[in-house]
Image (spheres, coloured by chain):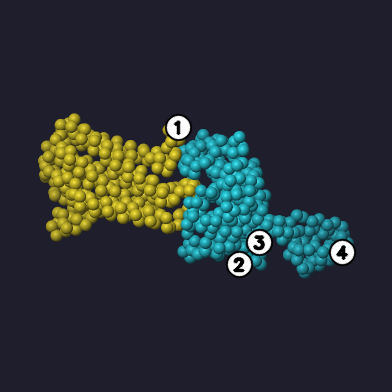
Chain colours: A yellow, B cyan
Amino acid sequence: MLRDRFLGSVFAKTVRDWLQWTAIAVITMWLVSVLYIWVMAESGDAYVTMMEDFPEALSNLYGFNNGTAEGLAMSGIFFVLGPLVLLAYAIGLGSSAAVGEEEARSLPLLLSSPLRRRSVLLAKSAVAALGILVIAALTLLGVLAVAAVFGMDLSEQNVLGTSIQLLGMVFLFGAISLGLSAWRGSSALGVGIAAGIAVVSYFVTTMLPVVEELADVAKLTPWYLFSGADSLQEGVDVVLLGIALVIAAALFGLGLYSIDRRDLKG
Amino acid sequence: MVTMERGRRIEEMTTTDGAVPIRTERLTKHYGDVKALVDLDLEVHRGEVFGFLGPNGAGKTTTIRALLNFVFPTAGRATVLGHDAASGSVEIRSRVAYMPSEYSMYPKLTGAENLAYLANLRGGVDRGFVGELAERLDVDLTRKVGDLSTGNRQKVGLIQAFMTRSELLILDEPSTGLDPLMQQELQKMIREVRAEGRTVFLSSHSLSEVERVADRVGILRHGHLIVVEPLDALKRKAIRRIDLEFDEPVEAAAFARIAGVHSAEARGNTVAVSFEGSVNALLRAALDFNVVNVNSREADLEQIFLEYYHGNNDDAP
């Protein structure tokens, strides 16, 4: 009966289909977070000393570093692990929302029902967005709980702010993948370009500031909309978050517009 | 009780607005330089089984995809049940059942779950009727679709089309993968749909699939509609064969120049002649010799279709 309930709508079935990916992402985030916090609680000072000896370009790759064990733990979770897991989830499912059924050749049967293409896209996008929020929320709660167990002194407000700032960038990359995939009917294009921009912008944003003349160039990348906020220290940067969400909304709009106006493949 | 409700429902559906099930006007679709469909003018009548024939790549599936708004025409327009194919596609698909030629179901779901999902999205599907169809087509709906054979997956696909009891069924190569017994059952189901006053648009590259059930056929070649005729009319036009047996060998040339004769071939005392039109002139010429036996064979419909397919017919573009 429960299984049948998950077959009542495109939204419900998509929740059912993607539940495993959401669970894998949450468990990954929890396990690695526990590991980070545990290691930093036990041997954080040694890592802080080690990081201080790293060249600036290398330590920048790790993200935020305020010279404390807590800072290193949060940086590992929110600047390395979080983006990695959430971007993979958002880029993968953003593309799948747009063209997953089309490429799997199940779309003709699905659209034999009286559904608009954009309704299918909206339902699947909503599930992807919900999944991202669930992963972020459960990760945040898990991190705060584990940090409390290990006696770490965190600013809950700034950790929450960092999560929100990260969500802005994750929605942006998810929307790049979704918009491009829906526009051209190709997951390879959407995933490839979104993942490519993510990797390049990560390195540009973290490494270019080492060269003084190129430091401003780093501010032009999507990654800067997250890392530029310095949210573990300063909380949410509303302007950068707003820019990320506006661009994400525009790309999502492109996806919605184009999905109803192009030939379906297959 | 259930049967009465079913009958009422079918009656409601078949008398909704009297709109022409399918009409296309100069419907054209190009994919880059490839002209998949050119100036298709077609009208499918209510309550008929229309066979849409053509070799692979002729444009049959493109036509269907344009009717259901899966692709946008390069030129021309189509209406389905009175609705414009582009602007009224949701309304159209609420009243049309469609079975694609190439598709995937959800392999991790069972047949029953696949059908439940599609039934939920459409609404108004009688689950009891789904069970009846599964019994008729002898398919186990409790198995995952990914574990089913091609033929059994095809049966699940057929159930999803027939379970809707739509007023128009668009079936694209529906008998692919079915064994002869199931092909017969499918033909029976199609005839039942017609008997209820509903319409079937049956696309196929196989004449044998179509000729047993279709009222009219349209033949498509290289994107052009070559002919639309009642099946009986096509049969009348078909090339027939007659074997004339004489008491001694006769030259085939004696028959080759007669009007309507396509070919004449002598084998021993027999001359095999293929011809169209009246047989009178042929028989008159035969009577110049001593005829021992005349053996007339049934019209070879396959031949006329092949001629259309290959473009040997005068009407073909």
Residue that label 2 marks: B317
Asked if the residues shown at circle 4 and circle 2 are in contact, with their CB atoms under 8 angstroms apart, the answer is: no
Q: Amino acid at mark 1?
A: Met
Residue at (29% x, 36% y) in the render: A27
Q: Are marks 1 and 4 in contact (CB under 8 Å)?
A: no
Q: Is disc 2 placed on a helix, strand or loop? A: loop
Q: CA distance from mark 3 to mark 2?
A: 13 Å
Q: Secondary structure at mark 1?
A: loop
The crowd level at tag 2 (other Cα within 10 Å; few <14, some 14-19, many 20+) is few
Vertical comparison of A250 with B153: above or below: below
Q: Amino acid at mark 2?
A: Pro
Residue located beneath label 3 in the image: B307
Mark 3 / mark 2, whichever is N-terminal: 3
Camera-nearest label, 4 or 2 = 2
Are callouts 4 and 2 both on one chain?
Answer: yes
Q: Is residue B131 above or below residue A245?
A: above
Q: Which mark is residue B142?
A: none
Q: What residue do we see at 61% from left, 37% from top? A: B3
Could you tell me which chain the residue with mark 2 belongs to?
B
A99 on left or right of A207: right
